[in-house]
Image (cartoon, rainbow, N blue to C red):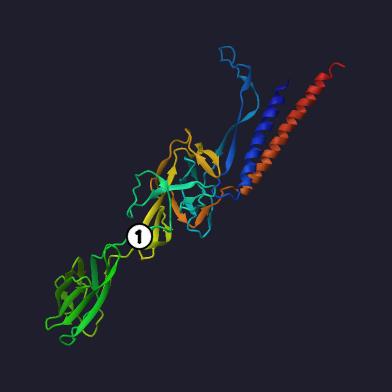
């Protein structure tokens, strides 16, 4: 049988695979996080009809004569080039700008994805459209331990920012140096205990011949006193006072004429608060904004990268799984160790280039037609051969 017949058949198979891959690329032109694939061809074994020979003194050497036996698919490689960004306005959507993969867990299996379209389930966990759970680290007392094991990333309305007791307060502004003796300036400030219960602390500033005498009274019964003196409007001394467990710093208060603007500029402590909203930083850190005005870290999204990303196996649903070819996943924080940064409110679109894919479609079609012509021509030759004897 003619070798060209089988070469043509192998060409049909190879170009059919190219058509399949190209068609799949075009079908996923609008799939978030999709990475296009490319087919590589290589020739198969060649039949040696004459071996090569070395040159001799009286005659030159001969090159080997070989007849190829067709073509085969050497591999289908994935193009992990960055896709374009599409704004969604949803805080739960994420895009990796640069290298890296989201880590997800589904049915106990760890998978990796570039598609960052996530939403919340009934437990407040971030999940992909197929139900895979986004992995990362949960915060403990507002801190992240990136060395701990991965877990589900959750943002729940049940999260509470704990209450904190007030321990420090700072006053600023001005006490008028031209005020009458025994004139008073009274300022109230709200403070909190460790359970978040609010109470008032009253500071009474009384003008004296030397400056201002300050008396502090806590609603719980604690008191404190100090005296403030000024030279050319600047305070002499530290200007501090303790009212129970609260340290009051008045070092920034001035003593110029005419202005009575002394006020609390800063104090710590807060009541407990419920989660109102959250935002994500470029390193994947999720920061919650609570009803008590506090901002607290509640978690961080983890990313993974591979020595050979091309060795990943497609697992469906825009996900990949690690193989021996890809190597083990190296887990880290976005923006470090070669990992890309994260952007909230965006998703990465497909990196399929339609102009290139339609060109590949034409190339595959013509290749298929040409190999079909080989089979037709070989068949005509065989027909001539069978008609030699009539």
Q: Is residue 340 left or right of residue 226?
A: right
Residue found 57% across the figure and 44% down from its top: 36
Q: Assign a secondary structure to mark 1.
A: strand
Query: Picture quarter containing residue 291?
Result: bottom left
Q: In this view, does 273 lie above or below 70?
A: below
Residue 127, given in percent of the width and then of the height, sits at: 49, 50
From the image, which quarter does the C terminus lie in? top right
Q: Which of 258 and 118 is in front in this view?
A: 118
Q: Is residue 203 visible?
A: yes
Residue tagged 1 = 161
Q: In this view, does 115 lie above or below 324?
A: below
From the image, which quarter does the N terminus lie in? top right
Residue 316, given in percent of the width and then of the height, sits at: 56, 42
Residue found 55% across the figure and 38% down from its top: 77
Q: Which of 318 and 247 is in front in this view?
A: 247
Q: Is residue 173 above or below residue 168?
A: below
Residue 373, given in percent of the width and then of the height, sits at: 75, 32
Q: Is residue 179 left or right of residue 197?
A: left
Residue positioned most to the right = 390
């Amino acid at each position: 049988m003619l070798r060209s017949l089988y070469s043509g058949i192998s060409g049909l198979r190879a170009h059919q695979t190219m058509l399949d891959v190209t068609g799949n690329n075009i079908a996923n032109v609008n799939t978030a996080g999709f990475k296009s694939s490319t087919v590589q061809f290589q020739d198969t074994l060649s039949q040696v009809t004459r071996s090569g020979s070395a040159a001799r003194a009286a005659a030159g050497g001969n090159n080997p004569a070989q007849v190829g036996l067709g073509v085969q698919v050497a591999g289908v490689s994935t193009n992990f080039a960055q896709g374009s960004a599409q704004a969604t306005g949803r805080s739960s959507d994420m895009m990796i700008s640069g290298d890296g993969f989201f880590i997800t867990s589904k049915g106990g299996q760890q998978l990796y994805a570039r598609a960052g379209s996530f939403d919340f389930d009934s437990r407040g966990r971030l999940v992909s459209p197929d139900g895979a759970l986004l992995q990362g680290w949960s915060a403990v007392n507002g801190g992240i331990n990136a060395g701990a094991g991965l877990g589900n990333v959750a943002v729940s309305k049940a999260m509470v920012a704990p209450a904190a007791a007030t321990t420090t307060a700072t006053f600023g502004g001005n006490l008028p140096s031209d005020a009458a003796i025994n004139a008073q300036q009274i300022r109230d400030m709200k403070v909190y205990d460790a359970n978040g219960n609010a109470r008032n602390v009253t500071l009474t500033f009384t003008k004296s011949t030397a400056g201002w005498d300050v008396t502090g009274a806590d609603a719980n019964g604690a008191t404190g006193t100090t005296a403030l003196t000024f030279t050319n409007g600047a305070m002499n001394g530290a200007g501090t006072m303790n009212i129970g467990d609260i340290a009051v710093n008045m070092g920034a208060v001035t003593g110029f004429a005419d202005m009575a603007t002394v006020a609390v500029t800063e104090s710590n402590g807060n009541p407990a608060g419920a989660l109102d909203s959250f935002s994500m930083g470029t390193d994947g850190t999720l920061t919650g904004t609570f009803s008590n005005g506090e901002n607290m870290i509640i978690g961080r999204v983890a990313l993974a990268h591979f020595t050979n990303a091309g060795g990943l196996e497609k697992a469906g649903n825009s996900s990949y799984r690690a193989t021996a070819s890809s190597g083990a996943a190296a887990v880290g924080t976005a923006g470090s160790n070669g990992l890309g940064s994260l952007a909230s409110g965006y998703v990465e679109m497909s990196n399929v280039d339609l102009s290139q894919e339609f060109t590949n479609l034409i190339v595959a079609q013509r290749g298929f037609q040409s190999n079909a012509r080989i089979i037709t021509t070989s068949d005509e030759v065989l027909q001539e051969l069978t008609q030699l004897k009539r």
